[in-house]
Amino acid sequence: MTRRPSAVAFVLAALGFAAVAATFSDAARLARERQPFRGETAALAAKLGLTDLALFTEARYTRHPTQADLHSAFQDHPLALEHFPTGSLVVPRPHEPLDRKTAQPD
Amino acid sequence: MNPWIEKQRSLIDFTLASLARRKTRNLGLLAVYGLLVFVLASVMLFVHALRQEATAILDGTPEVILQRMVAGRHDLIPPGYLERIGRIRGVQAKEGRLWGYYYDPVVKANYTFMVPGHEIAPGTLHIGPGLARERGLAPGNTVSFRSYSGRLFAFTVGAVLPQKSELASADLVLLSEQDFRAFFEYPAGHYTDIALSVANPQEVRTVAAKLANALPDSRPILREEVLRTYASIFDWREGIVLTVLAGALFAFAILAWDKASGLSAEEKREIGILKAIGWETGDVIKMKFWEGTLVSLAAFLLGYVGAYLHVFRFDAALFEPVLKGWAVLYPRFSLTPAIDGLAVATLFFFTVVPYTAAVLVPIWRAATTDPDAVMRA
């Protein structure tokens, strides 16, 4: 006997919902597993008095956004160039290339 | 079996057979739809987990950090400043902190140099795992940095901070106070800022107000402000990604609307035939309702489960280039999963319901007209 397509669809949908439910149980299990590491990081942060995450290390106001000067660029959010309307009128200075290529091949 | 259920099963059988007749088109639609749900769900899961992580990790940050401002810029704490704070009721401890930034031209990365509360032997460094990986360093190795005055300083790596703490410590260089002052030629008795610990959370604002009164050139930064800044940063990041995605969302909305509302001649003929052989308008609509539900449900299930695996099992590998920005040193970290059930329910609602509704509108129009007219059109 051939299986009806609707039966296959029900089984697949049930599997899909089971997978969604499994993400919640897997998340709980992973959270329990990773909790000690988070605790270790939090303990290190508390011991050293760290105020920021090391997510964006390119500049001081992105490395420590909470400690940046008042009104400095990026202080409130990483992509904000300027707090004031001037920012929409004056283009920021282009970045000076740190390692230039030689004009002539070596 | 209940006749109603049997009828719905037959309708689903028919719908699936009808979808299978246009296999390539429907599979293409499902792939694009699923991919869109995948990206949206990935952003949602990632940002939520990162926000939770930041809150948990920075929970132990000092209650108050006191900076000194000169001409609107952060300046060093001069000698005698700590004493001027005096005894403020509620302040348990106050301590001058030493930290700063160093640009390493070897790997073109920025490091955070810091003097920890505990003792580190002079000439020794404890380095962050990101830095150790980038420079290929291990405990016992020697590393030298050229200071801003041009002198070369050689240090021995005493320890590498735990890899699991990389999210907070990737670029850290911990060294002794003596080495820090010599390396940066920091004037004696000066500090970068002051950390204050306040026992009672209710008193933090009062303490900050007293500090601002006693030292008008100071800027107190409270722990709650630190946490708030991080919440706003991630909200902003999520917003930016979603704004960028808005183009893709609209494109998909147009595609879905076009696919769902603009019936092809073949579909119209099919509806006409169904009506001619005795299907009722209600049956045609039910069949199309099942089509919309099955396609959007499959897209949601595939997209959401894929997003979960991407963010928590593959450490959001696809987002790394976006988040990395300009930084050379980027922490490798596994987020602790935290799923916001309400957000998942919202995503479900906004992916499944609009598509199903969009499918029904044109069908209603086609199914209520005369079968002969529909077939001739």
Image (cartoon, rainbow, N blue to C red):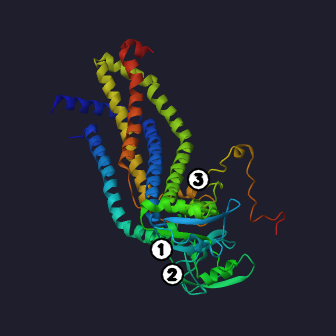
The location of residue B254, given as percent across then percent down, is: 51, 32
Calculate the distance from the C-alpha at mark 3 to the C-alpha at mark 1: 26 Å
The location of residue B145, given as percent across then percent down, is: 67, 79
> What element does badge 3 sit on?
loop
Chain to which the residue tagged by mark 3 belongs: A
Q: How many other residues sit within 10 Å of disc 1, few (<14), some (14-19) or many (≥20)?
A: some
Chain to which the residue tagged by mark 2 belongs: B
Residue at 52% from the left image edge and 65% from the top image edge: B64
Q: Nearer the viewer, residue B312 or B222?
A: B222
> What element does badge 2 sit on?
loop
Residue at 75% from the left image edge and 79% from the top image edge: B150
CB contact under 8 Å: marks 2 and 3? no
Which of the labelled discs sits on residue A47, or is there none? Answer: 1
Q: Earlier in the sequence, mark 3 or mark 1?
A: 1
Which of the labelled discs sits on residue A76, or is there none? Answer: 3
Q: Is residue B305 above or below residue B262?
A: below
Q: Is residue B150 above or below residue A79?
A: below
Q: Which kind of residue does numbered mark 2 sit on?
A: His
Q: Which kind of residue does numbered mark 1 sit on?
A: Lys
Residues flagged by tags 2 and 1 on a common chain: no
The quadrant in which residue B76 appears is: bottom right
Quadrant placement of the C terminus of chain B: top left
Which of the labelled discs sits on residue B89, or is there none? Answer: none
Residue at numbered disc 2: B118
Q: Nearer the viewer, residue A62 or A5?
A: A62
B288 vs B124, left or right, is left
